[in-house]
């Protein structure tokens, strides 16, 4: 339906994407360091308000993740600027290219790449993660083939015409599943992750599909120069469904973290002295024994992670338990929990689920209510301001899973929230004066997902 740019009292702008029938959410402003003239126009009556919507012409696209036509990897190339948002559609396999520079407060459609381009030229479908490359091309990781089977491959687009050029990976090197990826040229490496087969995801989560091998458990190591797959590291059931992968931002650091949804774990990956890559389990969120839910044990379901720009803190969201956690990762192998906030979820104290046994010995949290609005759903996608002081969160994961686990969110719409971060001592606190309610869009409730900073953010920029 509709989607949103919004503006708040710091006059920092964000971008979100929504998974609904006609919308792509977009940007409103020149970026992190906003000119004074723009800040003067920001009154308290415009805090957390939608100021523009761009509707896309097709139904059931499932607008999910996004990327830029240029980012820090293009540093030094004066011909490149962060002017276009690359917005793959997870279900339809279209790719929308959106102009966010001509009129930053009213983004417009620049080009639509039809799914036949991706399918015929690459044998891929269901595009997910988009990164710009240092050579000016765009690379998009895909999770399936045109028949809905799992297939992890990478499509290359021309950075000017956005014509699909072909596959990045070598013939025969596609993985069983795909999802996210992050590259680091200084170490000649790329790491990619796995979700599941699109035809299994489309109708909601079914544990039987895990048993049938329709969800991934591995991360993959690629040679960045030759495009060859070097290693596949199976994380097993403890690392089932490894989703978001993040290198440290410091380009000399040959390490990072991956969040595993079903395993409710975080693994550190790193290069060994021998030159290959390995992993170690560094965080495990225990499941809770419950009644009144689909299964007798409820995993936390880690669905998004990010690392602060100074590489000091790791954040992740537990989409079922309903909390966001902040870890101090100064000791890379021993993350230390320093902040936690419950913002909805499936174990709220007045809900139908009763926690029978909690290894962490925490009481069931009360409902999360902001400005009179009860939060339906749970914290999902995260984005952190570049100074590390404001953490933004949306509540929608994927429409089929939203419908299954949080049906009230489909009726009332998702929300965007903000937490204030103590980036000196650690700690996160909900800002109770900030809420973007996507249930009040002109064409009905919207499921808002990802957020972006037009001037760059903690989850899209790669330094060389």
Image (cartoon, rainbow, N blue to C red):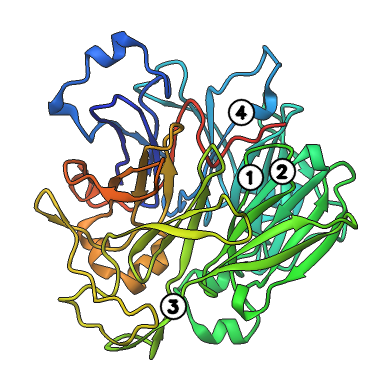
Q: Which residue is mark 3?
A: 299
Lateral position of residue 394 relative to residue 226, left or right:
left
x and y percent of residue 128 in the render?
58, 51
Label at residue 248: 1
Q: Nearer the viewer, residue 207 or 234?
A: 234
Label at residue 165: none
Q: Determine the secondary structure under disc 2.
A: loop
Q: Which residue is mark 2?
A: 253
The part of the image, by quadrant, that contains residue 278 is: bottom right
Question: Which one is earlier in the sequence, the residue at label 3 or at label 2?
Answer: 2
Label at residue 71: 4
Q: Nearer the viewer, mark 1 or mark 4?
A: 1
Q: Determine the secondary structure under disc 4.
A: loop
Specify the quadrant that holds the C terminus: top right
Q: Nearer the viewer, mark 2 or mark 4?
A: 2
x and y percent of residue 204 in the render?
44, 73
Q: Residue at x 85, y 47 (%)?
A: 227
State yes or no: discs 2 and 1 in contact (Cβ < 8 Å): yes
Question: Which one is earlier in the sequence, the residue at label 2 or at label 4?
Answer: 4
State yes or no: discs 4 and 3 in contact (Cβ < 8 Å): no
State yes or no: discs 1 and 4 in contact (Cβ < 8 Å): no
Visible residue check, residue 57:
no
x and y percent of residue 384 in the render?
43, 41
């Amino acid at each position: 339906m509709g989607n949103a740019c919004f503006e708040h009292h710091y006059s920092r702008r964000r971008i979100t994407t929504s998974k609904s029938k006609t919308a792509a959410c977009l940007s409103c402003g020149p970026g992190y360091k906003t000119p004074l003239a723009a800040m003067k126009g920001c009154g308290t009556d415009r805090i957390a308000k939608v100021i523009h919507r761009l509707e896309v012409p097709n139904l059931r696209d499932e607008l999910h993740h996004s990327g830029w036509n240029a980012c820090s990897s293009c540093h030094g190339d004066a011909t490149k600027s962060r002017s276009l948002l690359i917005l793959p559609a997870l279900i339809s396999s279209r790719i929308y290219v959106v102009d966010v520079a001509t009129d930053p407060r009213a983004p417009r459609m620049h080009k639509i790449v039809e799914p036949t381009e991706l399918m015929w030229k690459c044998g891929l479908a269901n595009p997910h993660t988009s990164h710009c490359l240092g050579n000016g091309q765009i690379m998009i990781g895909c999770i399936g083939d045109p028949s809905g089977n799992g297939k992890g491959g990478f499509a290359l687009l021309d950075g000017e015409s956005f014509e699909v050029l072909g596959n990045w990976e070598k013939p025969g090197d596609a993985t069983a599943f795909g999802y996210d990826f992050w590259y680091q040229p200084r170490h000649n490496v790329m790491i990619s992750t796995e979700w599941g087969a699109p035809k299994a995801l489309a109708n909601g989560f079914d544990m039987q599909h895990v048993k049938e091998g329709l969800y991934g458990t591995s991360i993959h190591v690629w040679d960045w120069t030759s495009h060859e797959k070097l290693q596949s590291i199976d994380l097993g059931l403890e690392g089932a469904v490894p989703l978001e992968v993040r290198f440290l931002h410091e380009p000399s650091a040959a390490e990072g973290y991956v969040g595993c949804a079903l395993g409710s774990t975080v693994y550190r990956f790193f290069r060994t002295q021998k030159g290959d890559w390995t992993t170690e389990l560094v965080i495990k969120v225990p499941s809770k024994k419950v009644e009144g839910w689909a299964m007798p044990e409820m995993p936390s379901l880690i669905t998004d992670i990010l690392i602060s720009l100074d590489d000091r803190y790791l954040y992740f969201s537990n989409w079922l338990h309903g909390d966001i956690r902040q870890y101090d990762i100064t000791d890379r192998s021993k993350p230390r929990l320093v902040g936690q906030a419950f913002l909805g979820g499936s174990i709220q104290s007045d809900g139908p689920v009763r926690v029978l046994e909690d290894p962490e010995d925490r009481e069931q949290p009360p409902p999360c209510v902001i400005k009179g609005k009860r939060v339906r759903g749970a914290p999902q996608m995260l984005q952190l301001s570049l100074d590390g002081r404001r953490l933004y969160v949306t509540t929608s994961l994927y429409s089929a899973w939203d419908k299954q686990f949080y049906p009230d969110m489909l009726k009332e719409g998702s929300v965007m929230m903000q937490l204030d971060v103590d980036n000196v001592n650690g700690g996160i606190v909900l800002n109770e004066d900030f809420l973007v309610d996507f249930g009040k869009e002109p064409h009905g409730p919207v499921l808002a997902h990802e957020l972006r900073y037009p001037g760059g953010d903690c989850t899209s920029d790669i330094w060389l």
